[in-house]
Image (cartoon, rainbow, N blue to C red):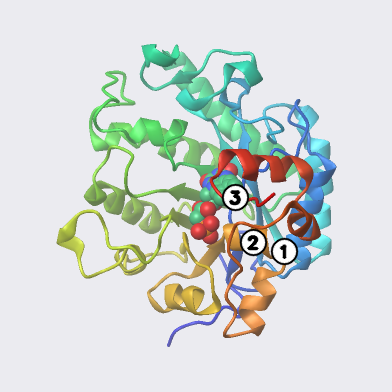
Amino acid sequence: MSVSLADPIAFPRGPGWRNRIALAPLTNWQSHDDGTLGDDEYRFLTRRAEGGFGLVMTCAAAVQKSGVSFPGQLAVYSDDHVEGLARLAAGLRARGAASAVQLQHAGSRGNPEISGEQAVSPFAYAKRNVRALTTAEVEQLVRDFVAAAVRCERAGIDGVELHGAHGYMLCQFLNAEENNRDDGYGGSYRNRTRIYREIIDGIRAATGADFQLGVRLSPEKYAYSTDEAIAFAEELLGGGQLDYLDMSLWDSFKLPDESGYHPARLVDVFGRLPRSGGVRLGVAGHIFSSKDAQDCLDSGADFVFFGRGAILHHDMARRAIEEPEFVSKTFPVTRDYLAQQAVGPAFQTYLATGWKNYVAD
Ligand SMILES: Cc1cc2nc3c(=O)[nH]c(=O)nc-3n(C[C@H](O)[C@H](O)[C@H](O)COP(=O)(O)O)c2cc1C
C-alpha cells in the first residue's frame, strides 16, 4: 500500500521526519559575504519549519572558498561558520523540523570576483580561466567535504547532503566526455564516481552513528548517460552508507530524453529502483500540488522535495498535507507578496535577476 504525505518517515541514521515533505535546497543570497548565516536566511528557513516541512535543508553551502559562486552564499569551510549553523539547528529543531546543510563546491562555476580565488574543476576550461585540480587538491577537497560535515554535526545540524548534481564540482567529476583524468579520479565509471565514495566513507568515519547523510544527483544533461545515472543511483540506494538519495529531476513527470525508457516518466524510472538497508529515495522537480506529490509517492519515492512552491508558500508542506486539492501559486509574484512569505530583499533580487519572470514589478 502506498504511503501518504502525512506519514512520518524513518532513516537508518538520524532523526525520523514528521512527514514526507522536505524543503529543497534553495540558493537565496541572504547570508553574509564571509559565509556566516544571515538573519534573512534564518527567517526564510525557520518560517518553512513553522510551515510544516519534515526536513528543512539549506542552500548549497561552500566547503572551500574557491567553491563559492553566489553573493551572500552560506558557507561551512571555516569554524567561524559554526555559530550561525548552531543557531539555525536550534531554531529548526524548536519548530519540529529535522535539519540538513547541502554541501557544495561550485567547481568551474566558482565566481572569482566573489571568492577571490581562481575557479577549479576536475578538468581545465581555458575559456573561463578554470584550472584542473591536482591530485593532492582532489584529496584535500575530499577532506574539506568531510570537515564541513563535522562542523555541521558540531553545530547540532542533523545531517548533510552532498550536492552531486546540476553540473557543479562533484557532478563535473561524472562528466564522461571531459573528465579524462588519469589519476584514478577520471575515465571509467568507477573512477569518475570515486570522489563520491571517498567523501561518503570519510563522513561516515568522522561523524557519529546518528548523523544523516544524503546525496543529490541529476540524471540528464550533464554529459553522462541515463543508464549510468541509474547505475549510480542503484549503487547508492543499495550501498547501505546513505540515509537518502535525492534525485533532482527538474520535471519529475517528464519522459526521459532517452526513448528506450518510455512510457515510464523520470519519477517512475527512479521510483522503481531497489533499495536496501532502509536507504530512502526523495525526488524533486515540478511538484506543485498535493496530487503531484502523492503521485511521486505512488510511483515509488519515499518522500518529496518542494522547491519553487516552497518559495511561494512558506507553509506549502502543511497545505499539501491538509488540503488534497492544494495547488501552488505560480510566478511571477510581487516583492510584497514574497516578503509576506519571509523571502527577504536579497532573495527577491536573486529571483528577479537570476530567473526569468519570477518577480513582477
Ligand atoms: C531559486 C532557486 C535556487 C536553487 N538553489 C539550489 C541549490 O542551492 N542547490 C540545489 O541542489 N538546487 C537548487 N535549486 C533547485 C531546487 O532545489 C529544485 O530541485 C528545483 O527547483 C526543482 O524543484 P521545484 O520544481 O519544486 O522548484 C534551486 C532552484 C531555485 C528555483
Residue at far bottom of view:
1
In the image, residue 198 sits, relative to residue 304, either above or below, namely: above
Residue 92 in sight here: no
Dot 2, how many residues are within 10 Å of its Cα: few (below 14), some (14-19), or many (20+)? many
The answer to whether the residue bearing label 1 lies less than 8 angstroms from the nearest atom of ligand 1 is no
Query: Which residue does the image show at 56% across and 50% down from the upper left?
Result: 357
In the picture, the disc for residue 310 is 2
- Neighbor class of circle 1 (other Cα within 10 Å; few <14, some 14-19, many 20+) is many
Q: Is residue 166 left or right of residue 149?
A: left
Task: Identify the amino acid type marked 2.
Answer: Ala
Q: Look at label 3 and name its amino acid.
A: Pro
Report which residue position mark 1 lands on: 314
Along the line of sight, the residue nearer the viewer: 358 or 201: 358
Q: Position of residue 254 (x, y in %)?
A: 33, 63
Q: Front-most of 56 and 150?
A: 56
- Callout 1, which amino acid? His
Disc 2 CB within 8 Å of nearest ligand 1 atom? yes
Q: Nearer the viewer, residue 328 or 99?
A: 328
Residue under the point 71% across and 69% down: 315
Q: CA separation, marks 1 and 3?
A: 14 Å
Q: Earlier in the sequence, mark 1 or mark 3?
A: 3
Q: Nearer the viewer, mark 1 or mark 3?
A: 1
At which x and y percent is residue 310? 64, 61
Q: Using residue 294 as the reference point, say whether residue 28 is left or right of it.
A: right
- The local secondary structure at tag 2 comes to helix
Q: Are marks 2 and 1 in contact (CB under 8 Å)?
A: yes
Label drawn at residue 25? 3
Circle 3: is it few (<14), some (14-19), or many (20+) Cα within 10 Å?
Answer: many
Residue at coordinates 38% horizontally, 31% vertically from top-left? 172
Real-space Cα distance between discs 2 and 3?
Answer: 10 Å
Mark in front: 2 vs 3: 2
Q: Are marks 1 and 3 in contact (CB under 8 Å)?
A: no
